[in-house]
Structure formats: structure tokens, C-alpha cells
Image (cartoon, rainbow, N blue to C red):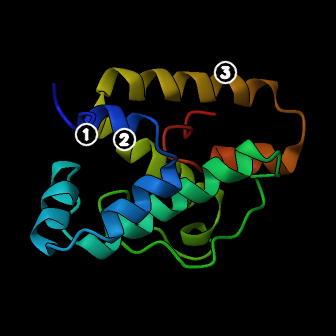
Amino acid sequence: MDRYAPAWKTIELMTIGNIQSLYNNLKKPDVQADIALHYGVAKIGIFQSYFEAIRKARNMCAHGNVLFDTKLPQRLPHGPAGNLTQPDNSNIIGIIAVIQYFIRQISVHRYQEMCEELKDLLKKVENEKVREILKNVSGFETF
């Protein structure tokens, strides 16, 4: 019998913030770089910035906050999720671009499902400001 639970089992019970802290506190930068590269991100700083954007969005959703006009405290850097310019590099468009990027890295099929679900959702949005924001997100150009 092992003394400790397997890593996958332990991480499964961690919050996104706990996982982010674990990643940020890894003692070997080459391990951080390997993890980032696994997801197609060449620089640790960009990976950390993306991770923070996802954590912020998740927490806002979990606590019932409004996402469509959110502002990230730090702008998202240019990277594989896109070369976002102001203000998109610090708003919901940037956050969605990062989430889309990671989902696509994990599963192209799930990425396609997400885009379809977001398009269906866009059809139901009555608020013009929200519709305009969502139309500018990658994958919504056809609306």
C-alpha cells in the first residue's frame, strides 16, 4: 500500500487556484517550461498569465459576477492564444480567446462544440452591447 495518494487523485480535488499555486511554486523552471510546452506555450510567463485569466474568469462565474465587462488587472501578452490588442487583451474577448486556445489544445472536437454552443447562445442574447462583444470573439465572425 502506498503512503500517499497518486498525484492525479490529489490534483483532482484541488481548486484552480491551488493548481496555479502548485505550478508557480515548482522549484525547477524546466518542469514549468515542460508543462507550458505541453499546451503549446513557449514562455512560462505567458502560460502563467493565461492561467491567471482562466482562474479569474472561473472565480467570477462561481461567485455570480458579471463577465461581459470585466477587466483583467494585467493585460494578456501576445502568445499562441492570439495577438490581442487593447482593450481586448484585458477584457472578456481575451479571456475567451485563452479558454478557446486551451480547449483546442486538449480536444479539437470539444473546441468545435464550445464554438457551436457559444454561437447558439449568441442567438439568444438580447442585450446589444453583449452581442457586440461576443461577435468580436474568435469563431463568431459569421454573425
Left or right: residue 27 compared with residue 45: left
Left or right: residue 122 compared with residue 16: right
Residue 6 shows in the view? yes
Amino acid marked by disc 2: Ile
As measured in the structure, the alpha-carbon distance from the residue carrying label 3 to the one carrying label 2 is: 33 Å
Residue 35 vs residue 8, the one in the foreground:
8
Q: Is residue 141 above or below residue 44?
A: above
Label 1, secondary structure: give it.
helix
Mark 1 packing: few (<14 Cα in 10 Å), some, or many (20+)? few
Where in the figure is residue 4, as x and y percent of width and height?
24, 38
**Image marks 1 and 2: residues in contact by CB distance under 8 Å:** yes
Q: Nearer the viewer, mark 3 or mark 2?
A: 2
Q: Quadrant of the N terminus?
A: top left
Mark 2 packing: few (<14 Cα in 10 Å), some, or many (20+)? some
Q: Earlier in the sequence, mark 3 or mark 2?
A: 2
Q: Which mark is residue 11?
A: 2
Q: Is residue 114 above or below residue 54?
A: above
Amino acid marked by disc 3: Asp
Please give the residue where the numbered disc 1 appears in the rendered image: 7
Residue 12: image quadrant is: top left
Amino acid marked by disc 1: Ala
Residue at 41% x, 75% y is 77
Where in the figure is residue 76, as x and y percent of width and height?
47, 72
Label 3, secondary structure: give it.
helix
Please give the residue where the numbered disc 3 appears in the rendered image: 120
Q: Nearer the viewer, mark 1 or mark 3?
A: 1
Label 2, secondary structure: give it.
helix
